[in-house]
Image (cartoon, coloured by chain):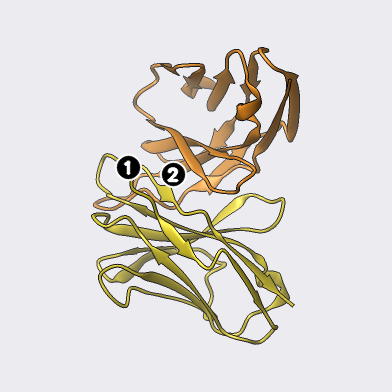
Chain colours: A yellow, B orange
Amino acid sequence: EPEVTQTPSHQVTQMGQEVILRCVPISNHLYFYWYRQILGQKVEFLVSFYNNEISEKSEIFDDQFSVERPDGSNFTLKIRSTKLEDSAMYFCASSAGGGNEKLFFGSGTQLSVL
Amino acid sequence: AQKVTQAQTEISVVEKEDVTLDCVYETRDTTYYLFWYKQPPSGELVFLIRRNSFDEQNEISGRYSWNFQKSTSSFNFTITASQVVDSAVYFCALSGAHYGGSQGNLIFGKGTKLSVKP
């Protein structure tokens, strides 16, 4: 079965540094998402992306966050100036969209901000 | 506001027992979608089922079955004859219908950690 690929699997950074989390969605999917999961807590929606623009975002997704689809295959999440509370598992997901909705999630990137 | 409640934080059963994971949701949407995802110890999120609000028919897939009851706003998940490999965190999620777009902004419950012991 096709899968969503995320790199790196673990990222350690210093507070205040910029990080870019990378994702390769399933090739024929049109909708892309980022979710995060703080350790031991529920999975939270961050942002959805379609047709090269953000279609919806949550309150968590403030000005420190941005997403980009720089080419036909990658989908990135940038955190401009990381805070301690950004430490979490970040999941990328994609879907074909339309009525037959099913989100395919990647294995996640564990971000640790020190 | 949309909300998903999974009241059971942790459940422990012995292999071959049946187990039911509860999910109660709140939404004002008349059209919505309910999901179950499995998160094994390896961390990825694995899709199990999607159900729309107009389809109250219960579903069975092998040892898994789902009971959707709109009257009680519940979407419970039962594993029959549980196995050690079923040990994981199970998340129930809710999504509203958005005209012309993807129902991808899921509201997750806090999850139920299921431990199946041999």
Q: Nearer the viewer, mark 1 or mark 2?
A: 1
Q: Is residue B33 left or right of residue B71?
A: left
Q: Residues within 10 Å of mark 2 (few under 14, many from 20)?
A: many
Instruction: Confirm whether residue B78 shows in the render.
Output: yes
Q: Position of residue A18 (x, y in %)?
A: 57, 84
Q: Residue at x 67, y 35 (%)?
A: B112
Report whether mark 1 lies on the same chain as mark 2.
Answer: no
Callout 2: SS: strand
Identify the image quadrant of residue A80.
Answer: bottom right
Tell me the residue that label 1 is attached to.
Answer: A101
Q: Which residue corresponds to mark 2?
A: B95
Q: Are marks 1 and 2 in contact (CB under 8 Å)?
A: yes
Name the chain under label 1.
Answer: A
The image shows residue A36 at horizontal and vertical percentages of 57, 59
Residue B75, horizontal then vertical, whole percent: 52, 26
Q: Secondary structure at mark 1?
A: loop
Point out residue B5 in the picture as x, y percentages from the top left corner.
Answer: 63, 37
Q: Residue at x 32, y 78 (%)?
A: A70
Q: Quadrant of the C terminus of chain A?
A: bottom right
Relative to B102, is B32 above or below? Answer: above
Residue B1 is at least partly visible in this image: no
Amino acid under disc 1: Glu
Q: Which mark is residue B24?
A: none
**Rendering quarter of residue B60:** top left
Badge 2 amino acid = Ser
Horizontal side, residue B60 vs residue A101: left or right: right
Q: Residues within 10 Å of mark 1 (few under 14, many from 20)?
A: some
The Cα–Cα distance between marks 1 and 2, rounded to whole angstroms, is 11 Å
Question: Dividing the image into 4 quarters, which one contains the N terminus of chain A?
Answer: top left
Pinpoint the chain carrying mark 2.
B
